[in-house]
């Protein structure tokens, strides 16, 4: 039987979840204990998303509830370390000329709850900013997002410039968003295209050698 | 001979027939008798498909965004700043590719300077928030707050004028002070209501609106003759105007995606009440058709696609008020054109709950064979050559895809060939291949 916090979070009972967190803290629970339950709940949400039971609304609501719980816990967590080690690093962004962020944010959120350190460069990101972030963060995965056809060419030039900077070897690149498919993947010379946010997780896990 | 029946006395069917006959006989001076014959053949071909009949061949439309500009070597920025060159590009593109409709410049060529004058923060456009090479895009945020629902529901027009517009456009900033128009019905009370128009802030708002309006007027003076020229050359227009699903009105530019999703959990009743309240506004939006008299109204669908919500959420939040809007449009003899962008596979059964032969659905990445078996039994379906193929495929791949589409979705009529999503560019030879395949392979025996 799942903890009542896990139950509340994974069934989108926002008020209940926040009340339970308050009660746990009053009873002297450690923030780490609450965060572990949050992770457990996110696992349930992620599974339901993969199985086609949950969709964008539940993921966004989960993100919102986690943010609120984070705000409650933050003052009590001063000095504590960031938590367990990450599975790997991902640099993420919507490419130049495109300012759509819903898909990108979703992928960032899902990768984060699945244990990846995500550097989100935002929207309308110029090629050189991607190059710089890859150089600095040394990610295993570069994830490029775009909704419009203008993104096709920006993805292509981004990957070309990463390659020209000598950073393409060993880096795995995935693209995603509205009109992306295998034709575009070949055109931009990415390694994969993701149809849903879960594809990005599977790709990142495979890349870092986690089943 | 009996006098023509008054519009208000006509049945939905009679209104539809009248709108179609106006579409078929526009008040233009034909370039040649052949052009007139081609124009009418095109309308007949499309109407047959819309009526789920078998036309002479598969009709074909080009779902073009900024592509005519790109094809003529113009960036989106140039399209939105050099009106004569832009309009020429749309005209030349129409003549060159020779589809069954003209490529409409109306959604793309209004100069960016009009939006500058308006101070339109709701969108970014080429050279203003996005690069000159990128198309205009919505800047998503919670322009309407979660606490605004009661005001919207009580008085949608008042809310839009005094609360929403001042937040999204500097030209409307002072409209927050506009008093109710009831105030003007008695002379002794008018003085206080007039004062608001004298404030420096209001004069600044009005100056912006005058400037923007002037730019729009000059643009329209150049664009309308080009539309006339395209029609006179044999190409009908497709859409007379547009409207939106009530849920999308809220979920796109009012509350934004995240806002509307939070409302689904936190205040579902208010959200549904607001959607309901917006149905007559959405209907009215569609019925005002300023530029063309075609019977078709464009409705882009966004937040109801696969992945954006569950089937249950679709049936609760999205579909009921969209359906109400569609029935209202059909009652007025309008043919709603629904652009189901993204994937719509999980909604195909739900959307079948519509009168037969009264709507047309443009699908993007939905399986067209399944669409044909489901919604295709009650509505004309349109689509869906992938944008990626137009951009990065070969002409042969496009022709193959199109032939397969004609075999499945085009079987027994009720189908219009199109690109699945709005194309801001692509290879000219690929577009030629799509259209040639419609004209040759798409001939019905």
Image (cartoon, rainbow, N blue to C red):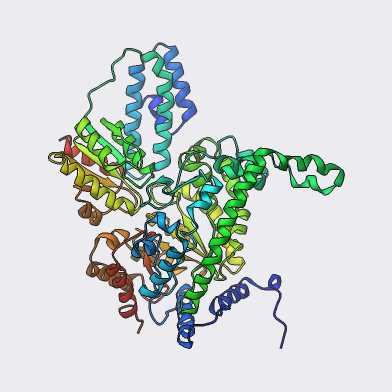
Q: Nearer the viewer, residue B122 or B154?
A: B122
Does B52 appear above or below B216?
Answer: below
Q: Residue at x 62, y 67 (%)?
A: B332
Examine the image and state in which quarter residue A158 appears: top left
Q: Residue at x 53, y 52 (%)?
A: B114
Quadrant the N terminus of chain B occupies: bottom right
Q: Nearer the viewer, residue B71 or B441?
A: B71
- Asked if residue A54 can be seen in this view, the reply is no
- Asked if residue B388 can be seen in this view, the reply is yes
Quadrant the C terminus of chain B occupies: bottom left
In percent of width and height, residue B330 lies at: 58, 66
Number of dots carrying numbers: 0
B157 relative position to A109: left or right: right
In percent of width and height, residue A176 lies at: 29, 47
Q: Nearer the viewer, residue B42 or A39?
A: B42
B220 relative position to B80: left or right: right
Does B54 appear above or below B75?
Answer: below
B236 relative position to A88: left or right: right
In percent of width and height, residue B172 lies at: 61, 44
Q: Nearer the viewer, residue B426 or B378?
A: B426
In percent of width and height, residue A165 lies at: 16, 40
């Amino acid at each position: 039987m799942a903890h009542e916090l896990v139950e509340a979070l994974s069934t989108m009972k926002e008020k209940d979840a926040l009340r339970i967190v308050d009660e746990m803290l009053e009873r002297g629970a450690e923030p780490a204990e609450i965060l572990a339950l949050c992770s457990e709940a996110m696992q349930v949400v992620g599974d339901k998303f993969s199985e086609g039971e949950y969709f964008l609304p539940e993921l966004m609501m989960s993100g919102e509830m986690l943010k609120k719980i984070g705000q409650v816990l933050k003052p009590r967590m001063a000095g504590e370390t960031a938590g367990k080690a990450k599975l790997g690093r991902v640099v993420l962004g919507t490419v130049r000329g495109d300012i759509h962020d819903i898909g990108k944010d979703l992928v960032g959120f899902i990768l984060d709850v699945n244990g990846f350190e995500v550097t989100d460069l935002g929207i309308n990101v110029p090629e050189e900013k991607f190059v710089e972030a890859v150089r600095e963060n040394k990610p295993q995965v570069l994830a490029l997002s775009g909704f419009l056809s203008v993104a096709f060419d920006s993805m292509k030039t981004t990957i070309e410039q990463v390659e020209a900077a000598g950073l393409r070897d060993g880096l795995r690149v995935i693209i995603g968003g509205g009109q992306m498919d295998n034709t575009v993947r070949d055109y931009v010379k990415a390694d994969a295209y993701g149809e849903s946010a879960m594809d990005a997780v599977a790709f990142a896990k495979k890349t870092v050698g986690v089943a | 001979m009996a006098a023509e029946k008054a519009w208000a006395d006509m049945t939905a069917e009679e209104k539809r027939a009248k709108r179609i006959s106006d579409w078929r006989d526009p008040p233009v001076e034909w370039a040649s008798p052949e052009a007139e014959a081609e124009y009418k053949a095109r309308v007949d071909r499309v109407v047959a498909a819309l009526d789920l009949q078998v036309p002479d061949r598969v009709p074909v439309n080009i779902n073009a965004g900024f592509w005519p500009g790109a094809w003529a070597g113009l960036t989106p920025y140039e399209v939105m700043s050099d009106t004569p060159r832009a309009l020429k590009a749309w005209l030349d593109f129409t003549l060159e590719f020779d589809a069954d409709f003209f490529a409409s410049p109306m959604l793309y060529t209004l100069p960016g300077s009009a939006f500058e004058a308006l101070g339109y923060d709701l969108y970014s456009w080429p050279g203003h928030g996005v690069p000159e090479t990128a198309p205009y895009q919505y800047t998503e945020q919670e322009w309407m707050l979660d606490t605004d629902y009661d005001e919207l529901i009580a008085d949608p027009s008042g809310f839009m004028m005094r609360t929403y517009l001042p937040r999204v456009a500097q030209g409307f900033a002072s409209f927050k002070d506009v008093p109710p128009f009831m105030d003007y019905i008695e002379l002794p009370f008018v003085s206080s209501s007039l004062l608001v128009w004298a404030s420096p802030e209001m004069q600044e708002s009005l100056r912006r609106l005058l400037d923007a309006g002037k730019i729009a007027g000059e643009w329209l003076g150049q664009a309308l003759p080009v539309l006339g020229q395209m029609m006179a050359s044999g190409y009908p227009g497709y859409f007379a105007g547009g409207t939106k699903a009530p849920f999308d009105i809220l979920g796109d530019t009012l509350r934004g995606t995240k806002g509307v999703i939070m409302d689904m959990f936190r205040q579902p009743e208010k959200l549904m009440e607001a959607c309901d309240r917006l149905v007559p506004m959405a209907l009215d939006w569609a019925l005002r058709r300023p530029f063309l008299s075609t019977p078709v109204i464009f409705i882009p669908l966004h937040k109801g696609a696969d992945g954006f919500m569950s089937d249950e959420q679709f049936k609760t939040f999205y579909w009921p008020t969209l359906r109400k809007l569609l029935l209202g449009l059909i009652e007025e003899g309008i043919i709603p054109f629904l652009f189901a962008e993204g994937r719509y596979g999980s909604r195909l059964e739900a959307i079948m709950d519509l009168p037969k032969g009264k709507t047309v659905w443009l699908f993007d990445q939905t399986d067209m064979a399944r669409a044909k078996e489901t919604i295709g039994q009650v509505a004309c379906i349109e689509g869906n050559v992938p944008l990626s193929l137009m951009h990065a495929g070969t002409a042969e791949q496009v022709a193959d895809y199109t032939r397969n589409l004609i075999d499945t979705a085009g079987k027994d009529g009720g189908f219009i060939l199109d690109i699945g999503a709005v194309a801001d560019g692509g290879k000219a030879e690929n577009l030629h291949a799509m259209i040639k395949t419609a004209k040759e392979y798409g001939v019905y025996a």
